[in-house]
Amino acid sequence: MRPEEPKKVEQLMTTPAITARPESSYGEIAQLLLDHDISGLPVVDEEGRLRGIVTEADLVSKEAYGYRRRSALGLLADYLRGHDPQWAHRAPGRTASQLMIPVVDTARPGEDVRTVARRMLQVGRKRLPVVDEENRVVGVLSRRDLLRPMVRDDEAIRSDVVELLSDPFRSPEGAEVAPTVTDGVVTLRGTVRWQDDAEVIERFIQGIAGVVGVDDLLKPTEASPRPVRPY
């Protein structure tokens, strides 16, 4: 059976990427974020190479910490209150180069989306700049981009499930399955030859875009063959 091809970052990323230059002002950055309804953007040099990332949180830090320099005691107090002292250091910044986070996690266009999604969760990122081999920004992958394939009409999902079940390379021989879809949950009713066949079908259906879950109500018509143990 043919396995489902995993989606690549380049299939879901937003392009062209909205970016700022190192010399972009506070006001210019804020306007870009508002105009494009985004919460962060990469900072790139003249060749489009990634220099850092600036977020709405970096801009808000100016309001939260004020425009004056913080004393060491003040920074300690902020830390003890659970505030991030790095914000306080960047708060006086006026340009992207002064406000941005210079060390940035990135993704590559050809990476598996599932791998990148796990990395985003592990490092707590809402978005990742997508860069090529020369570190030039070619797009941005956000949590919103990852959610987009999940928002699909039930009938569209069911159509994909029916197509999968009619494919002899992915649906086991002898399977008689009637699928229904409600709120992204696929319910499978009918029969399969062996219980293992039901598990194969379920795995394939879980790879369909928009599928939230699979309720397997399939019944095997034969007992699963067990391998003969050598004596």
Image (spheres, helix red, strand yellow):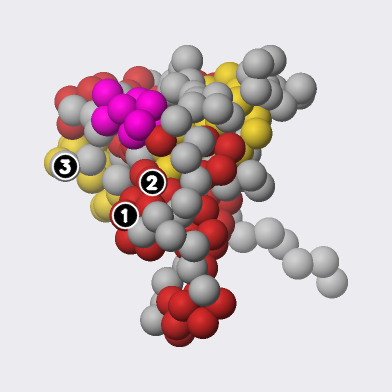
Q: Which amino acid does label 1 sit on?
A: Glu
Q: Does the magenta run of residues contain 79?
A: no
Report the magenta residues as a range: 27-35
Image quadrant in which the N terminus is located? top right
Callout 3 crowding tier (Cα within 10 Å): few <14, some 14–19, many ≥20: some
Residue at image mark 1: 63
Q: Which residue lies furthest to the right in this view?
A: 231
Dot 2 falls on a residue whose secondary structure is: helix
Callout 2 crowding tier (Cα within 10 Å): few <14, some 14–19, many ≥20: many
Dot 3 falls on a residue whose secondary structure is: loop
Spot occupied by residue 212 in the image (x, y as percentages of width and height): 30, 45
Q: Do the residues labelled 2 and 1 touch (CB within 8 Å)?
A: yes
187 w.r.t. 75: above or below:
above
Spot occupied by residue 25 in the image (x, y as percentages of width and height): 45, 30
Q: What residue type is labelled 3?
A: Asp
Image quadrant in which the C terminus is located? bottom right
Residue at the image position 69 percent from the left and 15 percent from the top: 47
Confirm whether residue 209 shows in the render.
no
Residue at image mark 2: 59
Residue at image mark 3: 183
